Image: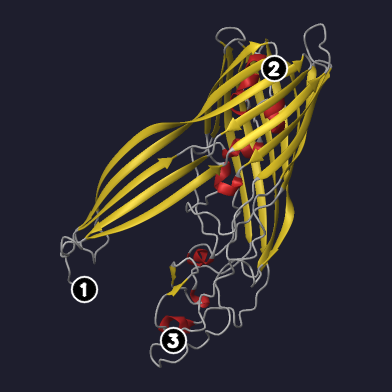
Amino acid sequence: MLRPVRLTVLAATVLLAAHSAHATSTLEAIGAPTGGNPLTARVLSHSSAATYFNPSLLPEATPKLEVGLYGLASQGSIRLHARSPYGLDVPTSVYATNRPFYTTDGIPLRPLATAELPNPRGDTDESSNALYAAIGLVRPLAGKALVFGLHVFLPVRGFLDQKSFFVDEREQFFSNQLHFERLGDRLNVSSITFGLGSMLSEWISVGAGIDIAILTESRVAVYIPEATDQSIALLAPDIHTNSKFKPYFAATLHPHARGSVVATVHLPFVNETNGQNDLRFWNKPRDQNSVLQTYTISQGYEPLRIALGGSLAGRRCADGSVPWEIGIQLLGERWSQYRDRQGERPLDAWSDTLGVTVGGRLLWRDRYLTADLGHVPSPVPDQTGRTNYVDNSRLVGSLGVEGPVKFLGRDLEAGLSLFGAYFLPREVTKDPFAQNPVVDEFPDDAVDLTTNLPADGALGLQTNNPGYPGWKSTGYMVGAGFTFRIAR
């Protein structure tokens, strides 16, 4: 065993990390930030946003350069149920017990006494305000036979925001609060997408695109000459940046001139950091001087998404404009394969979901008025057991107007869109008979090391799980965007 003092140690820590600094989770949450009908963009998009949502619509989009700003504010509220400290709190006698305790999945757990937690258990009010810049381009390369699309959506104040937390009793060592699982850092990521669309005939168009992820691989060797003095550390980093491409596909059928049927497929993706620390000690035998520490951090998981939809438009006017158009979009998402921020599968499996959104646009004078309304179901089952994945189904809607404007004597097109989402209130109560119940962090069979008798205060359930005995959650998001379009 290593002695804790008067010992010179050579400790080399090697960190291997593959980190992706990019995802499209923001677009999936708020819809298309440019153009009308942001929530039915897979069916009704006529702007550069079709590059990501449905590139097979690019041949029907007017060639334009787009520049815009989008602001988003979100507010989430988690109100914990009151709990009695008597009998539920972990007492200080836990420190005198005979061994570490284990969860049902075999992970060792040494809880802190409730009175000595770094942060007290408390309600959560999560609010964020983000400003994004949007740049888009639609450009024919060979008429409607081949059209190029570009769509870039970037947070103005940062390229990536990543925050991790645990969804069970392990969060006692950190914030000791609950957090919304599918919000927060998922709303502060960038998106860079390219797409090509082709009208093969009057009745079918196809498209494909790539979502570009920027990957950074880091190898950092850390030399600590004296283990008892952690203030001295020498680093030798090796950092490499690469890119990764996420493909997606789309097709649009035109059974007749005024109607369409669309289908899109976006493959699953997650921003994942896989790390390994190799600790080497100076005075250990060669076959014992290496201790491997491994970890996984994941962010912005997006499931397999398959959309089906259709649209119907009015008879075209003499100038080629469409007086009205309506559409419906069905979006299936395979959340049953979800991995959380530690790369772990939920103990209680999530469900696949099917969201429904309807939208339309109406020509009024020389401007289009747009509106969407939809329901986004939550894939998270009631959290009656050990885990605390906080998530709510949402009602979403949008309003917009777009049309020609004069700016500095030049004819342009501008669009204004408003977005809103309401988190349907949800209440959770823990169930002692759940399939994966809350862990008893001070088991009844714990033994006092001094007396060799049953530990004082161990009978019954003692837990520092911040979600026990339950909570109620709700919230909202509001957004507004303004876009200028210049004909190319």
- Indicate the quadrant containing the N terminus: top left, top right, bottom left or bottom right: bottom left
Q: In the rendered structure, which amino acid carries the disc numbered 3?
A: Val
- In this view, 368 is above or below 469: above
Viewed as shown, does residue 258 lie left or right of 338?
right
Q: Is residue 413 visible?
A: yes
Give the spatial CA distance, label 2 vs label 1.
73 Å
* Earlier residue among tags 3 and 1: 1
Q: Which mark is residue 3?
A: 1
* Earlier residue among tags 2 and 1: 1
Secondary structure under tag 1 reads loop
Label 2 Cα neighbours within 10 Å, binned few <14 / some 14-19 / many ≥20: some
Can you tell which of label 2 and label 1 is closer to the viewer? 1
Can you tell which of label 3 and label 1 is closer to the viewer? 3
Give percent across and percent down for residue 183.
60, 47
User: Which residue corresponds to mark 2?
Assistant: 413
Q: In the rendered structure, which amino acid carries the disc numbered 2?
A: Glu
Q: In the rendered structure, which amino acid carries the disc numbered 1?
A: Arg
User: Which residue corresponds to mark 3?
Assistant: 447
Label 3 Cα neighbours within 10 Å, binned few <14 / some 14-19 / many ≥20: some
Nearer to us in this view, 199 or 271:
199
